């Protein structure tokens, strides 16, 4: 469903991503691993439109999306979360989530004058869906809290809640397990599986190999800007090239 | 007693005109985080547009269309909005500091145009005999002011209600999200440029409305009415009252204007004539000190922002509102 072809990203003289091609098949949870500085987040930023590729192409469900702005890519059903959560700090958790649905009537300011009833009924439906989404992620008690007051792990759940409100086809998760305590990590893994069972595909950057092994198949490995290999998690774990990349050997 | 009363009317008209401008700035800064420091420029556009459209025929500069006051007011809003569109399209795609630089620049450019384009504005001598609404009724001075106060108050209520309705909504929610984190808002499907442009243009149109009313009330406009100090005053009103809250903008306008005129008359009655001019500088310093105090004691202003912006997301109890 997502296909990248010969993706390149240069920052000045530095080539952060070097001719990377891969596919994410519909219905999978695809993992993306690699040592720090391998270019994973840069790759994500290109997929989500935050960065424009230097060259190469990205297609999502048959349509080219490379070079399009993030909000336009979001409209195609491809949604990302951030490595470091970016909640709207001075907004409540409920508003963070209610913001998300696409093309809300009340987002056209004049509708709030002339079509108040329609806006209100849509808002009530959005609120119910937001409540249900927060309940699914165990955040319902925090609905009225400022997002900035949430713990780091809760903010990760809020990121997932926002992504879900978009009714996405594919979610890009950037390190959902980083800085999260083991209990919460278990919750996050469960939730990913439940969402996956509803028919949503994932592409996940992660360093935690337990999470990768439990959830992801296939796994893509990046090192030094390039794609090193692709395969099932067991094969990836045993591959000498991967070990070498992680342990700091010469470029494979 | 009538003297005091008529002064009160006079004071309130001016305060409410500033309140309109502060409401416009609140939409931009309070809700959207747009750093517009060229408020005086959009006020100027509204003032002159109104003078040209509704004023009498001038011997040396543009005018004489003699359009009804209501048309003049709408024209002033449209023109201020149009200028905002021209400024906003290239700058609102960029980081917010660029908007600040562009707006302060455009305000000075507009003032210099007003000063030098004599054929358009009357240059340094300004435009005179700008009409008030209901001028044909030949009301006395006091009655005329009273009628004007009612009109301005009605417009403040109208603008306030219109803003509250549009801001306590999904639209306001998107504005606030863009204010909080533009990149995250964009990655959640909202086009920051589109919403910022709407907020900027609407806010500037409201500033233009304030300018038109001011020109009509005073009956005279000149380039010296639009110095950067005006922008500073409006900002002080919004910060003191509480940015992100329309009632805060209203309260701040009345309070800061009371403080401004109050210190002005105190300086006038206490200071010897040689020091009067310096008294003006002291006024600015005092306002600055008040601003500093507010920022230290109540950083969110007297009436701070409410927890929830969109009406339907309000919760009982812990939601506070």
Image (cartoon, rainbow, N blue to C red):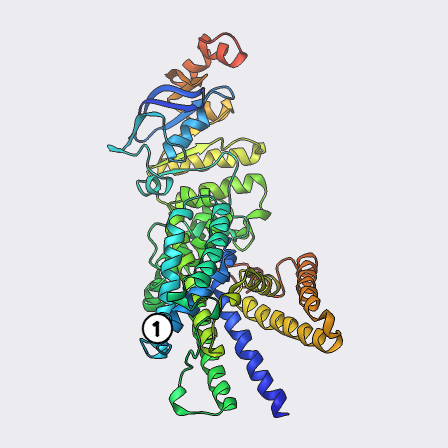
A172 vs B281, left or right, is left
Q: Is residue B35 above or below residue B23?
A: above
Residue that protrudes farthest toward the left in the picture: A62
Residue that protrudes farthest toward the front in the picture: B60
Q: Is residue B231 above or below residue B2?
A: above
Residue A236, given in percent of the width and then of the height, sits at 43, 15
Residue A162, given in percent of the width and then of the height, sits at 44, 45
Q: Chain of mark 1?
A: B
Residue A116 in view:
yes
Residue B27 in view:
no
The quadrant of the picture occupied by the N terminus of chain B is bottom right
Q: Quadrant of residue B296?
A: bottom right
Q: Is residue B171 above or below residue B274?
A: above
Q: Which residue is mark 1?
A: B63
The answer to which of B12 and A33 lies nearer the viewer is: B12
Neighbours of disc 1 within 10 Å: few (<14), some (14-19), many (20+): many
Q: Which residue is rendered at x = 53% and y = 33% of the image? A: A185
> In what element is the residue under mark 1?
loop
Residue B271, given in percent of the width and then of the height, sits at 75, 73
Residue A63, given in percent of the width and then of the height, sits at 25, 34
The answer to which of B146 and A5 lies nearer the viewer is: B146
Q: Which residue is rendered at x = 54% and y = 12% of the image? A: A247
B262 vs B99, left or right, is right
Total of numbered circles in the picture?
1
Q: Is residue A221 above or below residue B165?
A: above
The quadrant of the picture occupied by the C terminus of chain B is bottom right
């Amino acid at each position: 469903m997502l296909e990248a072809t010969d993706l390149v990203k240069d920052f000045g003289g530095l080539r952060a991503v070097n001719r990377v091609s891969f596919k994410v098949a519909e219905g999978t949870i695809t993992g993306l691993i690699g040592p720090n500085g391998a270019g994973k987040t840069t790759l994500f930023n290109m997929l989500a439109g935050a960065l424009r590729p230097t060259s190469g192409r990205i297609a999502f469900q048959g349509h080219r999306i490379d070079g399009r702005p993030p909000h336009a890519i979001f409209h195609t059903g491809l949604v990302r979360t951030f490595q470091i959560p970016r909640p709207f700090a001075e907004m409540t958790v409920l508003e963070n989530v209610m913001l998300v649905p696409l093309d809300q009537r009340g987002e056209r300011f004049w509708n709030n004058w002339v079509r108040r009833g329609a806006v209100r009924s849509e808002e009530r439906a959005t609120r119910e869906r937001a409540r249900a989404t927060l309940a699914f992620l165990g955040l319902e008690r925090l609905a009225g809290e400022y997002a900035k007051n949430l713990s780091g792990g809760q903010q990760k759940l809020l990121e997932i809640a926002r992504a879900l409100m978009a009714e996405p086809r594919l979610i890009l998760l950037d390190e959902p397990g980083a800085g999260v305590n083991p209990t919460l990590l278990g919750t996050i893994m469960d939730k990913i599986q439940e969402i996956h069972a509803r028919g949503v595909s994932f592409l996940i950057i992660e360093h935690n190999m337990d999470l990768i092994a439990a959830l992801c198949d296939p796994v893509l490995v990046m090192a030094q800007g390039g794609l090193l290999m692709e395969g099932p998690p067991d094969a990836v774990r045993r591959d000498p090239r991967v070990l070498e990349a992680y342990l700091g050997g010469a470029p494979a | 007693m009538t003297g005091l009363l008529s002064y009160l009317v006079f004071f309130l008209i001016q305060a409410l005109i500033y309140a309109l401008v502060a409401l416009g700035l609140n939409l931009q800064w309070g809700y959207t985080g747009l750093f517009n420091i060229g408020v005086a420029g959009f006020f100027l556009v509204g003032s002159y547009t109104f003078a040209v459209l509704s004023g009498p025929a001038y011997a040396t500069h543009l005018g004489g269309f003699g359009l009804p006051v209501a048309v003049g007011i709408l024209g002033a809003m449209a023109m201020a909005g149009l200028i905002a569109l021209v400024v906003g399209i290239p700058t609102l795609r960029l980081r917010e500091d660029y908007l600040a630089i562009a707006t302060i620049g455009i305000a000075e450019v507009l003032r210099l145009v007003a000063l030098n384009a004599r054929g358009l504005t009357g240059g340094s001598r300004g435009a005179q005999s700008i009409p008030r609404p209901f001028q044909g009724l030949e009301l006395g001075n006091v009655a005329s002011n009273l009628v004007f106060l009612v009109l301005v108050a009605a417009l403040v209520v109208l603008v306030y209600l219109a803003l509250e309705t549009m801001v306590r909504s999904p639209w306001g929610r998107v504005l606030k999200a863009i204010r909080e984190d533009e990149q995250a808002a964009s990655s959640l499907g909202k086009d920051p440029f589109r919403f910022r442009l709407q907020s900027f243009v609407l806010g500037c149109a409201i500033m233009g409305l304030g300018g038109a009313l001011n020109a009509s009330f005073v009956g005279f406009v000149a380039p010296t009415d639009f110095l950067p100090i005006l922008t500073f005053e409006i900002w002080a009103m919004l910060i003191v009252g509480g940015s992100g809250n329309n009632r805060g903008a209203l309260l701040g306008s009345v309070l800061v204007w009371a403080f401004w005129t109050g210190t002005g008359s105190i300086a006038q009655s206490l200071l010897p004539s040689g020091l009067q001019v310096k008294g003006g500088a002291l006024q600015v310093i005092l306002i600055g000190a008040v601003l500093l105090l507010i920022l230290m004691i109540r950083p969110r202003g007297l009436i701070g922002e409410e927890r929830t912006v969109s009406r339907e997301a309000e919760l009982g109890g812990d939601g506070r509102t």
